[in-house]
Amino acid sequence: MARTAVRGRLSWQIATVDGVVVETARVRTIVLGVSEWLGHRAGKHLDVRLTAEDGYRAEREYSIASAPGEPVAITVERLGDGEVSPYLTDELRAGHEIEVRGPIGGHFVWDVDHGGPLLLVAGGSGIVPLRSMLRHRRRSESDVPVRLLYSSRAIEEVIYRAELDDRAAGVEVVYTLTREQPPGWAGHARRVDDALLEEVAWPADEAHPPLAFVCGPTSFVETVASGLVSLGYPPARVKTERFGATGR
Ligand SMILES: Cc1cc2nc3c(=O)[nH]c(=O)nc-3n(C[C@H](O)[C@H](O)[C@H](O)COP(=O)(O)OP(=O)(O)OC[C@H]3O[C@@H](n4cnc5c(N)ncnc54)[C@H](O)[C@@H]3O)c2cc1C
């Protein structure tokens, strides 16, 4: 049984595109039908492989955007000069097929029984695996306290905005808009720094240390993770996922 599970996760299989959701001008969520999906936990990612007619292959990693138990979905940000992401966001339509492998990843995972309080910190598309955690929390009817600090360039670039702004979810969401702010914006308007973290993060209570998940471009993740450790978060309670430079 276990052997079958391992082979399943690591083998490439065909996924059918069941739908494409427009999230922002540059971001699409792609809902996939994967017949032999063995299930996933919140925070994991999968590999996507594209093969051109001449046999050239490209592989990239994408976090799983949906909660455990929901259909597999990925959310992709188009990088103008990227090789794979423009194809996924601009060309894929329902009924198309791509190859996937997964779920993959171990440390960057949150199950409801891991508890909290949870601090989620996202830069740009780094919100994707954190959204899976938020949906998992909601579907499990968990009352683990959660705060999300989400850095985007502009309000139009906030991914899953309607979902994040749904107060019924019981999530404290703090946005910071680093490049452009809409008229009358009263929120934060700078990159995440130590002072902003101190303002938003749960205090580092030694008896009940918060659990932090930080995801985004590499430099963002490094700044936030070291800021949280300076605030007294035990390094083992600060989980990180780096998406690479990705042109930001
Ligand atoms: C664990 C993990 C999870 C991820 N999850 C997501 C996700 O949920 N959503 C998401 O949108 N992305 C995610 N990513 C990023 C994703 O894997 C891709 O890196 C991203 O989509 C860009 O791929 P691309 O082929 O379009 O761009 P690439 O062609 O790989 O280019 C990426 C950038 O690097 C630059 N570049 C490319 N080649 C060179 C070169 N030779 N020299 C200098 N610069 C170069 C390009 O200009 C571009 O800006 C994740 C990455 C990791 C590691």
Image (spheres, grey):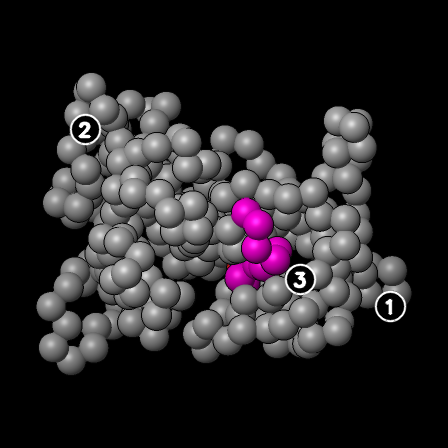
Say which mark, if any, is on residue 53. Answer: 1
For label 1, the crowd category at 10 Å Cα-Cα, with few meaning under 14, some 14 to 19 and many 20 or more, is few
Residue 224: x percent and y percent?
29, 41
Secondary structure under tag 1 reads loop
Q: Which residues are magenta?
A: 68-76
Q: Are marks 3 and 1 in contact (CB under 8 Å)?
A: no
195 or 175, which lies in front?
175
In the depicted structure, whether residue 99 falls above or below residue 156: above
Report if residue 170 is visible in the image: yes
Secondary structure under tag 3 reads strand
142 or 189, which lies in front?
142
Residue 45: x percent and y percent?
58, 46
Residue 41: x percent and y percent?
54, 41
- Does mark 3's beta carbon lie closer than 8 Å to ligand 1? no
Secondary structure under tag 2 reads loop
* Nearer to us: label 3 or label 2: 3
**Residue on which the image places disc 2:** 204
Is 119 included in the stretch rendered in magenta? no
The furthest residue to the right:
54
Q: Amino acid at mark 1?
A: Glu
Q: Tell me the residue at 33%/62% (across/down).
A: 164
The furthest residue to the front:
141
Q: Amino acid at mark 2?
A: Ala
**Residue on which the image places disc 3:** 32
Q: Tell me the residue at 75%/73% (across/down).
A: 95
Report if residue 245 is visible in the image: no
* Nearer to us: label 3 or label 1: 3
Is 75 included in the stretch rendered in magenta? yes
Residue 21: x percent and y percent?
54, 73
